[in-house]
Image (tube, grey):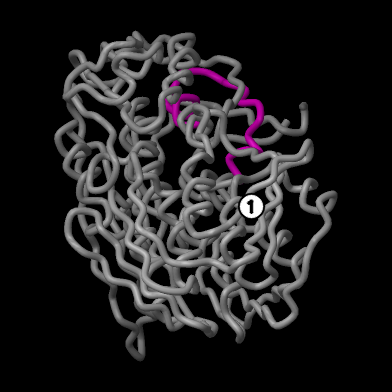
Amino acid sequence: MTDDVLVVHGGTPLEGRIRVRGAKNLVSKAMVATLLGDSPSRLFDVPKIRDVEVVRGLLGLHGVKVTDGTEDGELVFDPSNVESASTDQINVHAGSSRIPILFCGPLLHRLGHAFIPDLGGCHIGPRPIDFHLQALREFGATVEKTPEGLHLSAPNGLHGTKFALPYPSVGATEQVLLTAVMAEGVTELRNAAVEPEIIDLICILQKMGAIIKVHTDRVIEIQGVKRLHGYSHRPIPDRIEAASWAAAALATRGHVEVLGAQQADMMTFLNIFRSVGGEYEVTDARPPKLSDPGQEGGIRFWHPGGELHAVALETDVHPGFMTDWQQPLVVALTQARGLSIVHETVYEQRLGYTEALNTMGANIQVYRDCLGGTPCRFGRRNFKHSAVIAGPSKLHAADLVIPDLRAGFSHLIAALAAEGTSRVYGVDLINRGYEDFEAKLASLGAHAERP
């Protein structure tokens, strides 16, 4: 583990400019969608992260030729020779990503069968695939459980259906979209997720020839078509990474401009950021001129000095406060005066990372009750899903072990904000969702190095 550690010398404000590329939570799904086309697809602004490598490998196993395009961050996908992959080959990727479940619909359309290994991903709660399997069965798929995983087939093809999700799950909504677009007939999905990444995936599928209507009240209607072609698409930027750097600027009393960040997709975060006491400015793109190369627009985030303010917030599905935003922001809330309350309603086990913050001097207590908002689906169950953060707290250095992707970046922010030198173990996990984060840290003036 000695080669998977970052030594962080804290106490220095982050200052400078970084850029975010396409959203991790969209890019991997856009890559899966290429399986549905009968001609090549082009995806731009793809971040160099571990999740992209995993999906690229899985596509290659299934016969999709993936090559680098002429533009930096461009990938070209040729799905003309889709084929079956062995369970052993797929299992090589089993512990790395939860993406294989989304291959089911496209593979059932292309090959008539699919295989799902035991799924990996971050350990932030059970994250069951029941919604996915139930949806696939509704389309007409049969599921056979075996020791190595799940084998799916569609002996009578896939047919449109009416389906209501018990919770607006992003993954299950993506599953329905990727399956319904070529299922015979019309599919109606109720209580669908409507995150910006979902809408961007719908835009991609529409470019491919799909017919998808997004109605009010979380209803999506998909009319199946017989064929889809390739697409060319530049994805929305990663609003999670943008917010993570914003929280890092606030926690370290710094000033960070995030090029590529978009205001419209971050409005809920920006409101909380300002309520806490942070400042931001939306910077418009500057088009190139003869003597000026121009500049991409983004958002500048900074700590204006003085005290930060305690807030009460609860995570929710879009357009609520995103669950992936709360972990980085909580580090900044340890520096706010008063009692902040965070009620996590999306994942039941997402507050475990606070134990490490407490060892660094934070004062955070977690509770089973629904605090600071309306009761949620975890309220009468044995999950500590609410947190009270008392501040401001003086953070000091510690040895930290990263448990999952977003908590990992939060630990990194805490180490940057703390006095002294911390050792952060398991930092390679951050590469799953944050492109070239060590180089970005260096460009912002952070003092961190591999031992």
Does residue 80 sit above or below 180 in this rendering? below
Residue at (51%, 74%) from the top-left corner? 44
Q: On the image, numbered disc 1 is attached to which residue?
A: 100
Specify start and end residues of the magenta stretch as a single range: 412-431
Quadrant where the N terminus sits is top right
Regarding mark 1 in the picture, which secondary structure is present there? Answer: helix
Residue under the point 73% across and 60% down: 57
**69 up-or-down from 173: above or below:** below
Which residue type carries mark 1?
Pro
Q: Position of residue 154 (x, y in %)?
A: 63, 62
**353 versus 105 height, above or below:** above
Residue shown at the point (52%, 44%) measured from the top left: 441
Q: In the shown orientation, is residue 423 left or right of residue 315?
A: right
* Residue toward you, 363 or 111: 111
Residue 319 within the magenta-colored segment of the rendering: no
Identified at 70% across, 40% down, the residue is 145
Residue 375 at x, y percent in the picture: 21, 22
User: Farthest residue in the bottom direction?
Assistant: 290
Q: Residues within 10 Å of mark 1 (few under 14, many from 20)?
A: many
Residue placed most toward the observer, 106 or 68: 106
